[in-house]
Image (cartoon, rainbow, N blue to C red):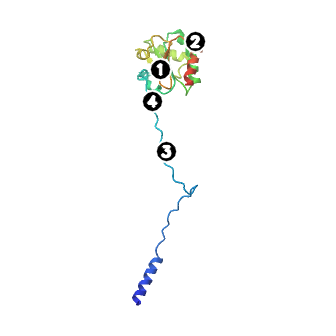
Amino acid sequence: MGARAGLLAVVVLLAGCGAAEVDEPEAAPSSSPSATPSPTPTPTPTPAVVVPEELDFTAATVGGGTFDGASLAGRPAVLWFWAPWCPVCQREAPLIAGLAADYEGRVAFVGVAGLSGDLAAMEEFIADGGVDAITHIDDRDGAVYSRFGVTQQYDLGLVSADGTVEVIRGPLDEDEIVAEVERLAAG
């Protein structure tokens, strides 16, 4: 082996010594020696809310907005049918206002103002009856009344969380109205 072979050995040795060291990432510590990463959980799909036929409508509100009946699907709700000239409805108004406040977030309340051609009378009834915290449908044409089969004011439309729709014929006394709302809230 000559000088040439010795020189080649020195070059190889120096090349190996001068190579940069690459840091390998360390494995994350695990709580057990055989731990394997758990798969990402698949989110549970939210079941689609079925909109009952009675709630498949859009209507004007007394305040000039729009109300979508389908917004009540999947949650307990009371549709309070009333007319501004109705003495039973006038008597029920404070009770409905109180129940709407007591059950806020658990039972939705919507007034359905019908059987009247006078928007100003509806607005006055809402203000005087203290039911201005709930939405009121302007049903002067009777379309929502008809959709629920209501032929008289002071009926209650009850929508359960499972989508069942039931109309309770009135007039009802205070205890009956409270019992129906409690039943809805209990599911």
Q: In the image, which is nearer the foreground, mark 4 or mark 2?
A: 4
Q: Is residue 112 left or right of residue 186?
A: left
Residue topped by disc 3: 41
| Three-letter amino acid code of the residue under disc 3 | Pro
Quadrant where the image shows the N terminus: bottom left
Q: Position of residue 158 (x, y in %)?
A: 50, 19
| Three-letter amino acid code of the residue under disc 4 | Val
CB atoms of marks 4 and 2 within 8 Å = no
**Badge 3 local density, few (<14 within 10 Å), some, or many (20+)?**
few
Along the viewing direction, whichever of 77 and 93 lies nearer the viewer:
77
- Residue 165 — which label? 1
Residue topped by disc 4: 49
Residue topped by disc 2: 173
- Spot the residue most to the bottom: 2
In space, the residues marked 4 and 2 are separated at their CA atoms by: 33 Å
| Three-letter amino acid code of the residue under disc 2 | Asp
**SS at circle 2:** loop
**SS at circle 3:** loop
Q: Position of residue 187 (x, y in %)?
A: 55, 25
In space, the residues marked 3 and 1 are separated at their CA atoms by: 36 Å
Q: At 40% across and 16% down in the image, what residue appears?
A: 143
Q: Is residue 173 above or below residue 70?
A: above
The answer to whether residue 118 is visible is yes
| Three-letter amino acid code of the residue under disc 1 | Val
In primary-sequence order, the first of circles 4 and 1 is: 4
Q: At 43% across and 83% down in the image, what residue appears?
A: 9
In primary-sequence order, the first of circles 3 and 1 is: 3
Q: In the image, which is nearer the foreground, mark 2 or mark 3?
A: 3
